[in-house]
Image (tube, coloured by chain):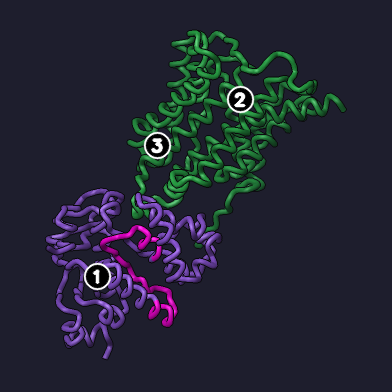
Amino acid sequence: MDAFLFQILAGLATGGIYASLALALVMIYQATHLVNFAQGEMAMFTTYIAWSLINAGVPYWAAFALTVGIAFVLGVLIERIVIRPVEEAPVLAVVVVFIALLVILNSIAGWIYTYTIKSFPSPFPKEPLFGIRYMSAHEIGAIGITLVVLAALYAFFRFTPLGLAMRAAAQNAQSSRLVGIRVGWMLALGWGLAAAVGAVAGMMVAPIVYLDPNMMGGILLYAFAAALLGGIDSPLGAVVGGFTVGVLENVLGAFVIGNELKLSLALVLIIGVLLVRPSGFFGRVHVTRV
Amino acid sequence: MALLEVSGLRAAYGQTRVLHGIDFRMEAGGITALLGANGAGKTTTLRALCGMVKTEGEVRFAGESIARRRTEDIARLGVAHVPDGRGTFLNLTTEENLRLGGYVRRDKKKVESDLERMFGYFPRLKERRRQQAGTLSGGEQQMLAVSRALMLAPKLMLLDEPSFGLAPLLVRELFQILRRINEQERVSLLLVEQNAAMALGLADHAYLMETGRIVLGGKASELKGNDAVRKSYLGY
């Protein structure tokens, strides 16, 4: 029983990270109707920036805040410079651009930082927090940070005029322009926010999986599975899906299929959801008149 | 000075020319109707004024050239557009739709009171305040589209078939509200309508379009008396 509870709680910790990354995917999907394959590499790259800052002697939380800011700016720049020119291009062209972005970011990280695995510090103490023995302090901290990020994003989109304008721009670009919203900038802001959320996920997962240019490969697969499970156009779904996938991965990995086959679980989930219920738990079912 | 001055306006969708050089002008505070059959180019004219299609020619709004400017910049100058198909933000609530209408305004207090004023014009919208706009009926969405445009506090309002899909009683009510807005707030209206009788009743000036050209223009009362207009568009 103890071991079971332990796996569930550990699953929630990684699940929070999948939830963040899945949410970043959903944010971009809502605006562009495309899945950003480079989301994981963007998170990885910004985690390296955090690593450089910390190594240069910047205190952890200052480095954390700086990295989130840099990630935001990078996200905006990527949208403006790379994505904007292919806005009107066919879907496949954009997908190729996403994949190119993935490969480029991966190679630049490898070129600058080498492919040697590095350890990444956790801001949380080594001893268990609050005397909880089932979870490490880092796992509790990661869940806490994830929840804060999710709550902040929810409040931003729900209660601020800018958040409302961003939702409007993602939904109906033409009507948004007619009320004077600068749709192009709203999309760029969306990319910035998604990159910032990804950066937080990267910094939270790096102490667990260690830092290397390929660290996000598996995690992005879980995030895809999470986003699909929750419904690719539903932010709430992404969060619920993220935690669900985290727990499933840990519990099934420990007791049913073994750790070696864990990653295939993500693939099974992706195919399963697409076959059985393509709109996921919370996604909108698209009905078209013929 | 004219509020809106259009000269030699041409527009095309891809290779297909839709407007073949139209000229008209509108005085500030007026109501002008654009009449014509389906496919005459009325909707395209409104879209061209807002930079929603590629155009050639000149459009001056309050003395400033707005031809080939971006739609959002034209909106920010005070041109509100109730588009063909209503342009509702289907997944947002009624209130959020209205707030978006006032998104670019800086006078936030006035925006709040304008919101209440819209609910005064259309009490149905107040009842549906927190409801997803996609669940509103066609008529309610039409009221929402007009209110959303008004929330911009526009100088000029372009209305594309505001009577479309409304019950006759509602059409009359809507036209009364439009007249009130025009008289009390000095909002100029450019109205595209199939319902020529209603439009000529409301407008002071009117232009008649046929296949991408303006073929007749003048005071609404003159057009009402014109035999050709009477036979083809008023049906008596």
Amino acid at dot 2: Gly
Q: Which residue is mark 3?
A: A188
Do marks 1 and 3 share a subunit? no
Chain A hue? green
Q: Position of residue A209 (x, y in %)?
A: 63, 18
Q: Position of residue B96 (x, y in %)?
A: 48, 55
For this rendering, which residue is in front, A147 or A184?
Answer: A147
Q: How many marks?
A: 3
Q: Which chain is purple?
A: B
Residue B176 falls in image quadrant: bottom left
Amino acid at dot 1: Ala
Q: Secondary structure beneath disc 2? A: helix
Is residue B85 visible to the viewer in this orientation of the structure?
yes
Do marks 2 and 1 share a subunit? no
In the rendered image, which quarter contains the N terminus of chain A? top right
Q: Which residue is mark 2?
A: A218
Q: Which residue is mark 1?
A: B40
Range of magenta residues: B147-173
